[in-house]
Amino acid sequence: MKEIVYSVIAPACNEEEGIEEFYRRVKDVMDAAGEEYELVFVNDGSRDSTIDKLLKIQSRDRRVVVLDFSRNFGHQIAVTAGIEHARGRAVVVIDADLQDPPEVIPQMIEMWKQGCEVVYGKRVKRKGESAFKRMTAFLFYRVLNVLSGQKIPKDAGDFRLLDRKVCEAMKTLREHGRFLRGMVNWVGFRQAKVEYVRDPRFAGETKYTMKKMMRLAGDGIVGFSARPLKIALPAGLAVCFLALLYLIAMIILTCVLTPPPTYLHFVLAAILGVLGLVLCALGIMGIYMGRIFDEVQNRPLYILRGKYGGENGG
């Protein structure tokens, strides 16, 4: 059996409308590369006919491998599963919604051949996304870099090529709250970027709801920084200092003004502000404690219903 040079990993959740077109475009690109490859689909608990279509594709193409999750474990876990089962010397991660164009992969391969061990795609333009989505994405990377102390590439998602050495390093990182682009940056290695224009979805609806995006942002910040815990103390001291200044000012005004000012509602507002700050600090600590709870259970990251194709595949 020939050595597999490239593995293309594609998480898929409810992508029945566009999965055939995605397969066709990736196949055309990889066939043109002229080297042995495999295409690893990860069915992340789809509720539509995605798995049926994937199995049909796999039955007619020996290079296709399908990992079928027992339920929805999330995008980051799906990518992790793909990395763990990929056999190529270079592994490309790309979503199956065709927002990240497969036609960029040859540029990544060329940079890999030149010695780059991580080649990530940087979005220079986002078609079909709202101004709110673009603004929150812009702010997220900059806030994350400030809080985490790492220089995670801005405007780069999970669309990237990883050398086999990087994949082996990633396999040793077993945390459950996963933020893969931060983890890739943490393991190091030589990195380079490829700029591209991100397209609208080919079909269907985005699976990254606002709740999931907030959770991913939380995993990115909490997983790579303890600074939110440290911020609570100086913020609390600042509020206490302002409350002391306000108390002194009210005492002075009470002495010099007749009648004295009514300040009860200001005092109550200050008390509520301090209580709110305390609750925020407790909430931050609760998030970290929750992550500790997840880790100490030592549960597997995912469970497969089945694997089709590849080594030991059906």
Image (tube, rainbow, N blue to C red):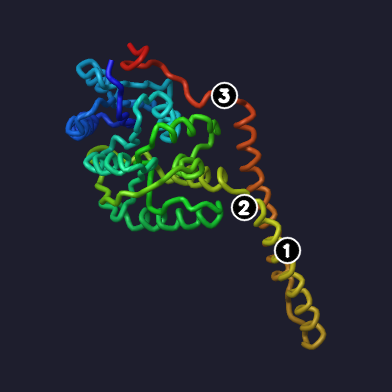
Judging by the rendered image, the residue that carries numbered circle 3 is: 299
Judging by the rendered image, the residue that carries numbered circle 1 is: 237
* Residue at 38%, 35% in the rendered image: 163
Depth check: 254 or 193 in front?
193
Depth check: 20 or 26 in front?
26
Q: Mark 3 or mark 2, which has the lower sequence index?
A: 2
Q: Position of residue 303 (x, y in %)?
A: 46, 20
Residue 228, which numbered label?
Answer: 2
Q: Nearer the viewer, mark 1 or mark 2?
A: 2
Classify 32 as above or below 279. Answer: above
Secondary structure of residue under mark 2:
helix
Secondary structure of residue under mark 3:
loop
Residue type, label 3: Arg
Q: Residues within 10 Å of mark 2 (few under 14, many from 20)?
A: some
Depth check: 310 or 20 in front?
310
Q: In the image as oriented, which residue stretches furthest toward the right?
A: 255
Asked whether, in this view, residue 210 is left or right of residue 194, the answer is right
